[in-house]
Image (tube, rainbow, N blue to C red):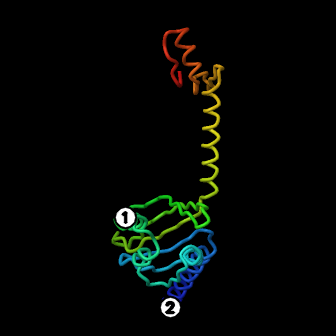
Amino acid sequence: HNKNLMREIETRNLIEAKLQTVFNTSTHIIWTVDTDYKLTSFNKNYLNQLQKYYKTEIKEGINFLKLYKEILQKAEYNYWRGKYAEAFKGKNILFETEKILESGEKIYREIYLNPTKNSKGKVIEVVAISHNITPRKQTEQRALEQSAKLTAIFESSSHLVWTVNQKFELTYFNANYIQTFKDKYGVSPVINR
């Protein structure tokens, strides 16, 4: 009986050590908050972020809402509070944030709030995981800008411009194409036909 107990303790310690390794070596920002909105744990990335962007020190057990009320604008604070309220109702929450630094640089983050439940199904804590998606957002923005430029070129062209997919369905056409098609066939062209 004693050997089984020792083995179980060793197994739990090993699992906890593995989790701590993941927690502290991840590039993600990770923190947990209990139902009293107390910060129950966080990794070094969370601590570094608060020091870098908000010039504040934290420790386990501080009131998370009070901290955020001090360091965030009112609208941003209310936004976060609402997201936590949803998570504490048992919902998994995914959202993005944008932070504009003093330099004007924008930092985008994707944030997951995941409720942790006890054996009775009651939410006892929310685990937050955040990661930087700035490179992805910058790529999306460049693609949108390029698309807008191409659309402007196509629309200002005196040529007929259209595209088709592999099924030879129209996927795009400019105003000149529409007018010519209307003049020739008496109807307007339709996307995906």
Where does the image place residue 71, in percent across and percent down from the top left? 47, 75
N-terminal of the pair, mark 1 or mark 2, is 2
Q: Of 146 and 80, which appears nearest the observer?
A: 146
Residue at which label 2 appears: 2
Residue drawn at x 63%, y 69% is: 27
Instruction: Tell me if mark 1 has few (under 14), some (14-19) or many (20+) residues whose alpha carbon lies within 10 angstroms of its own.
Output: few
Q: Secondary structure at mark 2?
A: helix
Position of 79 relative to 69 (above/below)? above
Q: Is residue 67 left or right of residue 136?
A: left
Q: Of 26 and 2, which appears nearest the observer?
A: 26
Q: Secondary structure at mark 1?
A: helix
Residue drawn at x 57%, y 13% is: 180
Q: Which mark is residue 180?
A: none
Q: Of 16 and 186, which appears nearest the observer?
A: 186
Position of 39 relative to 192 (above/below)? below
Where does the image place residue 142, in percent across and percent down from the top left? 64, 47
Q: Which residue is at the far bottom?
A: 2
Asked if the residue under mark 2 is in contact with the one under mark 1, i.e. CB atoms within 8 Å, the reply is no
Instruction: Tell me if mark 2 has few (under 14), some (14-19) or many (20+) residues whose alpha carbon lies within 10 angstroms of its own.
Output: few
Q: Of 144 and 95, which appears nearest the observer?
A: 144
Residue drawn at x 56%, y 70% is: 29
Amino acid type, callout 1: Gly
Residue drawn at x 50%, y 91% is: 2
Residue 172 in which image quadrant? top right
Position of 72 relative to 11 (above/below)? above
Q: Is residue 5 left or right of residue 117?
A: right
**Labels 1, 2: front one:** 1
Residue at which label 1 appears: 82
Where does the image place residue 138, in percent across and percent down from the top left? 63, 53
Where does the image place residue 134, in percent across and percent down from the top left? 61, 58
Amino acid type, callout 2: Asn
